[in-house]
Image: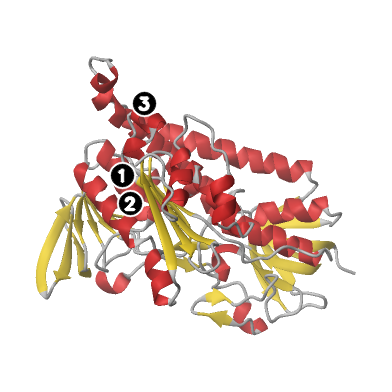
Amino acid sequence: MAEFDLIVIGSGPGGYVAAIRASQLGQKVAIVERENLGGICLNWGCIPTKALLKSGEKFESLSHLKDYGLSAEKVGFDFDAIIQRSRGVAAQMNKGVAFLMKKHKVEVIEGSAKLEKGRDAPRVLVALKAGGSRTVEAKAVMLAVGARARALPQIGLEPDGERIWAYREALAPKRLPKSFVVIGSGAIGLEFASFYRALGAEVTVVEAVDRIMPVEDEEVSKAAQKAFEKRGIKFRTGAKVTKVSKSGQGVQVAVEVGGKSETLEGEVCISAVGITANTDGIGLEALGVEMDRGHIKTGAHGETNVKGLYAIGDCAGAPWLAHKASHEGIHAAEHIAGYRTPNIHSPIAGCTYTQPQVASVGVTEQAAKAEGRETKVGRFPFRVNGKAVAAGEVEGFVKTIFDAKTGALIGAHMIGAEVTEMIQGYVTAITMEATEEDMHGIVYPHPTMSEAMHEASLDAWQRVLHI
């Protein structure tokens, strides 16, 4: 007889949330974690990076005090204290997850898991942190094993903790380098570029395609690059990295741009070239688990082709986002418990916490055109929004994309201060299948920057009020 109803492997935002939901539904649950409760996100990703970015934002704002009629003398920063604050935030989140596991009576098994053939679901063999091993069985097993930074040793792009960093090294460095070459202009690369530039470091970002933030709407991408360049970040787009070399003083990054070769130099290179799912060494091959380009192939409820085995989050494919993992974990947990569940493929917002911030949901204008869809597009700049002007945060704009035939809102893209806090309004609208009539009828509080969201929706239908 199975010892548990559900065993979750991995305690990141997908795994621990799934465990909580399963427990709420009366399931007996265990969670296996090889490192820290909360996974990469809470310990070495989403949360500690935001702590660093907030420190950088606060420091950068000191150079604009005169814009608000203020002044200060001898401003500076303590780099070690900034890092320690970030690590303290991560530790607090880790303790919070431990509390939640205890509250919901989820048994935490500390160790590394491996799967082998079982009866109702794969059997889980755990090499315990404390020594020895333990074998546990359940009616269902959920893989929430996440992913790790991708390395490219063939060109020398492999973290060494000194001259070449991935996210872990960039989050807890022993010193503040004077210059960086960041490879990759997605959220991870640009957030680290934004933080270190705010503290005065020279930063060059290298991107293989012809524009930064390639998953974002092209109009937002161009505006973001302009804003980042204004802050002193340099870019090499359309640049193929051919080799990364280390020296006693730093790194040299050889790139090809437009058929010409050049070398970029810095004290440190930050690798942000994507992720690799943590699917190796856990017994998937022996079980015959179907894979899709390095990720676990799943069905409508997170189920794999192996009886009783589910997979969620980063290990199950894009988008590689914590909130997507949590959503999938809840969905799968409810399905396992026998409940009818909402659509696992709900709209997922993307957020980048740079200065300015970038947020989006749904299709880009370019994707809509490629699909042959007739659209109506609206825009509204923050420079004419009252709250933005009062706050001195006039950079950026809001862009909306509607289906011209049905009136459905199908995409929204934003760049500006705190837009990551506003995008959820559009996520809700797209999830609820809102049309232009719904969007136009919403009353937004005044004065708020969210009023730009209303105006952008009105603009798509030639009804904008404040331009």
Look at the numbered disc 2 and give the secondary structure of its residue: helix
Contact (CB < 8 A) between labels 2 and 1?
yes
Work out whether residue 307 or residue 446 is closer to the camera in this orientation and state it.
446
Q: Which residue is mark 3?
A: 390
Q: Tell me if residue 42 comes above or below residue 321 in the rendering.
A: above
Identify the residue shown where x is 14% and y is 58%. 264
In whole angstroms, how far apart are the C-alphas of marks 3 and 1? 24 Å
Instruction: Give coordinates of residue 305: x percent, y percent.
Output: 69, 81
Q: Tell me if residue 67 comes above or below residue 203 in the rendering.
A: above
Whichever of labels 3 and 1 marks the residue nearer the N terminus, that label is: 1
In whole angstroms, how far apart are the C-alphas of marks 2 and 3? 28 Å
Question: Which amino acid, by three-letter code, is at mark 3?
Answer: Ala
**Where is residue 232, by image quadrant?**
top left
Q: Residues within 10 Å of mark 3 (few under 14, many from 20)?
A: few
Q: Which mark is residue 194?
A: 1
- What quarter of the picture does the C terminus occupy? top left
In the picture as drawn, the residue positioned furthest to the right comes out as: 1
**Where is residue 242, by image quadrant?**
bottom left
Q: Residues within 10 Å of mark 1 (few under 14, many from 20)?
A: many
- Residue 333 visible at all: yes
Look at the numbered disc 1 and give the secondary structure of its residue: helix
Look at the numbered disc 3 and give the secondary structure of its residue: helix
Kindly report which numbered mark, 2 or 3, lies closer to the viewer in this rendering: 3
- What quarter of the picture does the N terminus occupy? bottom right
Q: Which residue is mark 2?
A: 190
Question: Which amino acid, by three-letter code, is at mark 2?
Answer: Leu
Identify the residue shown where x is 84% and y is 56%. 28
Q: Tell me if residue 1 comes above or below residue 110 in the rendering.
A: below
Residue 93 left/right relative to 386: right
Instruction: Give coordinates of residue 196: x percent, y percent.
Output: 28, 42
**Where is residue 128, by image quadrant?**
bottom right
